[in-house]
Each structure stands twice: as C-alpha cells, then as structure tokens.
Amino acid sequence: MEPILSVIIVEYHSIQEIEDCVASLKAHINLAYEIIVSSNSCYDAQEREQINQHEANVIWLFNDSNAGFARAMNAGLRKARGKYLVIMNSDCMVKSELSPMVAFMDKHPEVGAIAPKMVDKEGNIQDTARPYVTLPRYIWRQVKRVMGHRTSILSTRMDYSKTQTVDWLIGAFIMVSRDAYEATQGLDDRYFMYAEDLDWCTRIRQKGFEVVYFPQAQIIYKGTRRARNDSKYAKIFIASHIKYWKKFGFFFGHPRRKKMIF
C-alpha cells in the first residue's frame, strides 16, 4: 500500500532521539505511512548495518557528508512516496493523532503547508508560527529577547487556539502537500541550517498555496536555540537570514497571506 504520509527526520549523532521520536510517531499515526531518516552522521559501513537492523520499519539514508539540514531533508523528500510529506526534528515528540491534519489538508487543497501547536514539556506554547522576518523585525525580536529574558515570544495579535493562516512555520514539524512540494522542489539547500523553513514557506505562498497553524494537533518541542549561546551557530544564523533577505527583501517583498480563520 502506498503511504499517505511520509515523515522525514534528519539524524546527526542522535540515535536515542530518533528512537524516541519514531516511537511517538508510531503511537499517533493511524493511516498508511513511512518514516525516512536522513543521517548526516557519516557512520562507517559496520555502524550503518547495525542501525539498519536495529530500527524496524524505518528507511535510513546515509549521507556521505554533513552538508546541512536542508540538503539532508531534501534527500529524504526525494525518496518519499506519500501524498503528504512531513519534515520533523529528531527532538520532537508527537502528542496527538496526525490524521486530523491530513483530513484538514484533504478538505483544503489550497493549503500547501500546515503545522501543529508546539508546547514544551510543561505545556507552555512555543512561538513556532511567526510573522515574516524582515531586518527591522529581526532586530526588534532580539531586543525583546534580551530585555525580557524570554526564549519564546508569542504574538499578542494571534489567538493560538484557532486554526488560521500565518506567515511561516518553524521547520521542527511541517506537513506539506505533494502539490506544494512539487511546485517548490523542497527546501533551498543553499542554506546550511536556519531560515530554510522561512524560505520554504515564503516560496510555497508564492506558488499560490496557503500556510496554516493547526492547534488541534500537538507536538512536544522546545528548540535548543544554539545560535544564542554559540558564536559558530550565531554566525550561521545571521548568514542564513542575510541570504533570505537578499532573495526576498530586507524590508518588504514577501507574498501577502490571505488572512483566514478556519
């Protein structure tokens, strides 16, 4: 049977996270699915064989080098056969059934990308649906983080209990229709990491699809936010956003969303 849902997870020296993530997926999917793990860990032949034998019903792709998150995801997306494709972080845990998201996408073919509510282990909502990142917004967001000592900055203009269109969704978990994937050909792998999710949602909307936040489904997730504490990742973070702004504009130029509440 052809899968309805293909879930792609990038692995980088995170086997235990993968096991926990896969277990949570299997417990909350009640339709035909496949799970593809795209590994950037550069394991040797013996390690690859052991991994393949260890996790049943998971397709492993072993990349020859760590060429970044977007390129690893694209390798998995090219392999995927599902009607709907999910990109997912290995440190996410599924908390509710995913079938309502699929049903929503079936009902709304104009929606190209959708993501659930994400909460941390204490149940605090995470800021995973966000406005476009222009240069002024980027600067103001960093100021708010420093002044407020906050890790998650929720929008005062958004009701997080309602299904609605948003500008973009963070790449920890995004479900995309096959049509939206084929229209965009996946993530832009010129980003090593950071901003590739922002870029993809922007291009999905450029192709005429909408991007939706769907709180009826939930994922447990809290980002590591390494770019705040490690200068190496901070440089990658800034470089990725500059690359995005060069494509879509430092101040404006993003495709406008249709403001809809479902």
Image (tube, rainbow, N blue to C red):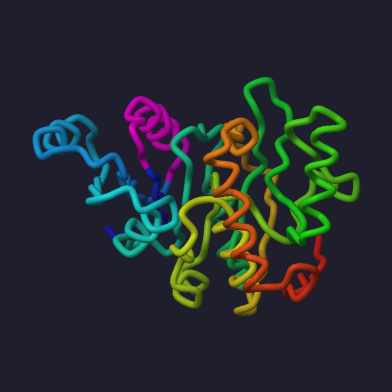
Q: From the viewer's side, name the closer residue of 255 and 260.
A: 255
In the image: residue 156, left or right of residue 246: right
Q: Is residue 159 above or below residue 109?
A: above
In the image: residue 55, left or right of residue 163: left
Residue appearing at x 37%, y 33% in the figure:
18
Residue 171 included in the magenta stretch of the image: no
Q: Is residue 222 above or below residue 199?
A: above
Q: Quadrant of residue 257?
A: bottom right
Residue 13 % position (x, y) = 33, 32
Q: Quadrant of residue 117?
A: top right
Residue located farthest toward the right when viewing the structure as drawn: 156
Residue 165 % position (x, y) = 74, 61
- Per the rendered image, the range of residues in magenta is 11-30
Residue 53 % position (x, y) = 15, 33
In the image: residue 8, left or right of residue 100: left
Q: Quadrant of residue 148?
A: top right
| Residue 100 visible here | no
Residue appearing at x 59%, y 62% in the figure:
113
Q: Main secondary structure of the magenta part?
A: helix
Residue appearing at x 58%, y 37% in the figure:
231
Q: Is residue 250 above or below residue 90?
A: below
Residue 178 % position (x, y) = 46, 69
